[in-house]
Image (spheres, helix red, strand yellow):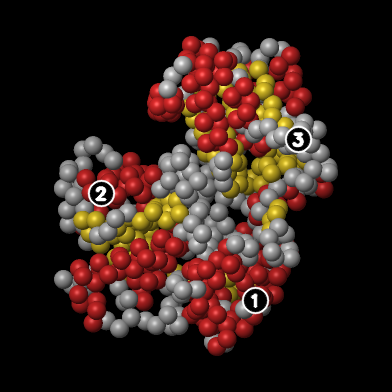
């Protein structure tokens, strides 16, 4: 067969699958294989029948949903009208990136692999199931899987074995070229725009919402800083219902922007235009012309924990033998444990890595910046308010992420730290945002009860739901809320107590640290087995769980199963079947995050 042309298509929500796809693209370039790397929805899926070699890289979002940038592809591929053998000329592989702490682990990759087989595609190897929870991270699966993939490609295209690949220390050409202009940046141009009144805000056109308040809702001595933040969305055309989420794309701190520019000897006020070396479009979110400050502050994720591709690129640019050898070691299969110990485990940022490799950092050309650093990704927050109660307002309940590792400086969440630093009392604060449909759906029927289990900030979507339901006259509401202490982090206490007093809510609380023996929401679920059996078996109640994905959702489901067995006299298997049936019909829903 002639030389192959590889197409790498990715579905990515947080940028990990995109990074992996581009890493595969660079591997292909080093093997001198012609390659294209595209998001799935940026590719005309009707052309798939004429492709010969495709590698799909995809993550799973929500409760087993495809990422936003592959939803159109997904709908097309699962059309029942597609003929069974329509992809019989295609050889392909599917690499899934997932997290086994979620119940629908790599669900999208598994389903895609099965569907491609149904359509007659030749699957070069079994679906790859990379796992964030692995001790060495997803690369523990990705590396051997890609090794097998390239072996299969060599069998298909023997002529490739005659080609001399590029060495790892030979840098590939950058994807973009920077053209610096003589003028300097005008600081006034850096403010986010208000958005158009005719359009509904989206990722490409967010609405600059005015922050009205930023209030700490945990007791001042409590270790966790949690904020209730309110935005004014007047004139935005934004509409949302309980269960929906707001997307916010954060900015790097002024301190990090300054440090980055110092390390790379960049003038933050310098102005440039971009051109792609392969003629592709430049990133839509970067204005043309653009300032270095805007690029670093709002686009490059310089404070993220870098992925392996970052070290591979740095190694190819390094001329210092000592630094190059260390970087090469981090990139090798044998050096993965070392890389994990240096970077992933202590959550070392890209900025900190640059400071550790000063000679290599000094050699980074501006043209390589967009290859080295990923784009800042938006963060999603459950909306904690209803438009029926707070007109033209949108509220979120946000824990400020701050923790320690072996590194001297505390680790901080980019978005939560940025939002927490904004003070609307010091002057106008505008935050670009947009709203997306969430995974939670609440019953429309007037008399259908809801049981809501939301410990900690997991209660946010349930506050929106309770506001909405009570305003509609729906009073069959049960809330299980848990936190550490009644006096320190009992979010919305007075609101719940008012609803209880009005007969519109049954409230069960678990304060884990207020007594010697820890009490969690799952214990309260067990204690109220008779109530839950009556609600679920006799009143067709819907049951919701929201919060941290680690242990809580499984523990609550186990407690619910025990309650059904205890009060309904059903077997373990029958209780499990009841929960499965509830999940299929939307009567059991979860929204969790790690």
Q: Is residue 347 left or right of residue 53?
A: right
528 relative to 403, above or below: above
> Quarter of the image holding residue 77?
top left
In three-dimensional space, the C-alpha distance between marks 2 and 1, rounded to whole angstroms, equals: 45 Å
The residue that mark 3 highlights is: 516
Which callout, 2 or 3, points to the residue nearer the camera?
3
455 relative to 536, above or below: below
Is 329 or 505 nearer to us in this picture? 329
- Seen at 54% across and 57% down, the residue is 285
Query: Please, what secondary structure does the residue beneath circle 1 have?
Result: helix
Query: Please, what secondary structure does the residue beneath circle 3 have?
Result: loop
279 relative to 571, above or below: below
The residue that mark 1 highlights is: 356
Query: Please, what secondary structure does the residue beneath circle 2 have?
Result: helix
* Residue 141 on image: x %, y %: 41, 60
Q: How many residues crowd mark 3 within 10 Å: few (<14), some (14–19), many (20+)?
A: few
N-terminal label among 2 and 1: 2
- Seen at 53% across and 62% down, the residue is 374
- Seen at 49% across and 26% down, the residue is 561
Is 11 or 539 nearer to us in this picture? 539
Is 580 or 109 nearer to us in this picture? 580
Q: Evaluate whether residue 74 shows in this view.
A: yes
483 relative to 388, above or below: below
């Amino acid at each position: 067969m002639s030389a192959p042309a590889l197409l790498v298509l990715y579905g990515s929500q947080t940028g990990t699958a995109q990074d992996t796809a581009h890493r595969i693209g660079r591997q292909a370039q080093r093997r001198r294989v012609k390659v294209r790397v595209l998001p799935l929805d940026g590719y005309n899926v009707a052309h798939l029948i004429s492709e010969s070699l495709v590698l799909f890289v995809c993550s799973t979002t929500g409760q087993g949903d495809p990422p936003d940038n592959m939803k159109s592809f997904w709908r097309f591929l699962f059309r029942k009208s597609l003929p069974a053998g329509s992809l019989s000329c295609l050889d392909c592989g599917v690499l899934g990136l997932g997290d086994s702490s979620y119940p629908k682990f790599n669900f999208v990759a598994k389903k895609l692999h099965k569907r491609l087989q149904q359509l007659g595609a030749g699957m070069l190897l079994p679906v790859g199931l990379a796992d964030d929870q692995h001790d060495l991270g997803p690369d523990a699966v990705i590396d051997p899987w890609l090794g097998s993939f390239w072996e299969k490609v060599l069998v298909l295209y023997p002529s490739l074995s005659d080609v001399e690949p590029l060495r790892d220390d030979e840098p590939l050409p950058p994807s973009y070229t920077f053209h610096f202009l003589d003028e300097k940046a005008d600081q006034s141009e850096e403010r986010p725009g208000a958005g158009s009144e005719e359009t509904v805000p989206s990722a490409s056109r967010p609405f600059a919402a005015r922050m009205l308040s930023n209030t700490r809702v945990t007791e001042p001595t409590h270790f966790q800083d949690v904020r209730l933040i309110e935005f004014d969305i007047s004139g935005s055309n934004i509409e949302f219902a309980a269960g929906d989420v707001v997307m916010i794309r954060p900015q790097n701190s002024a301190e990090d922007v300054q440090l980055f520019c110092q390390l790379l000897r960049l003038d933050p006020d310098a102005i440039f235009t971009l051109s792609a070396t392969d003629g592709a479009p430049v990133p839509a979110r970067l204005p043309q012309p653009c300032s270095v400050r805007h690029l670093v502050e709002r686009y490059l994720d310089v404070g993220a924990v870098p992925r392996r591709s970052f070290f591979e690129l740095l190694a190819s640019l390094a001329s210092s033998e000592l630094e190059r050898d260390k970087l090469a070691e981090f990139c090798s299969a044998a050096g993965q444990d070392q890389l994990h110990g240096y970077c992933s485990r202590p959550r070392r940022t890209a900025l900190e890595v640059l400071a550790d490799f000063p000679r290599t950092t000094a050699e980074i050309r501006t043209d390589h910046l967009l290859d080295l650093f990923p784009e800042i990704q938006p963060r999603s927050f459950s909306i904690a308010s209803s438009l029926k109660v707070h007109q033209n307002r949108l509220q979120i309940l946000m824990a400020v992420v701050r923790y320690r590792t072996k590194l001297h400086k505390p680790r901080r969440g980019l978005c939560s730290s940025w939002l927490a630093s904004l003070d609307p009392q010091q002057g106008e604060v505008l935050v670009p945002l947009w709203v997306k449909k969430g995974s939670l759906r609440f019953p429309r029927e007037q008399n259908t009860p809801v049981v809501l289990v939301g410990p900690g900030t997991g209660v946010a979507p349930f506050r929106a739901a309770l506001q909405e339901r009570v305003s509609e006259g729906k009073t069959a509401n049960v809330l299980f809320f848990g936190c550490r202490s009644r006096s320190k982090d009992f979010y919305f206490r007075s609101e719940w107590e008012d609803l209880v007093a009005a007969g519109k809510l049954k409230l069960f609380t678990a304060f884990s640290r207020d007594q010697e023996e820890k009490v969690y929401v799952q214990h309260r679920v067990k204690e109220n087995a008779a109530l839950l059996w009556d609600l679920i078996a006799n009143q067709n109640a819907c049951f919701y769980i929201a919060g941290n994905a680690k242990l809580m959702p499984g523990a609550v489901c186990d407690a619910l199963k025990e309650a059904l067995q205890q009060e309904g006299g059903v077997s373990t298997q029958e209780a499990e079947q009841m929960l499965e049936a509830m999940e299929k019909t939307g009567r059991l829903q979860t929204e969790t995050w790690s």
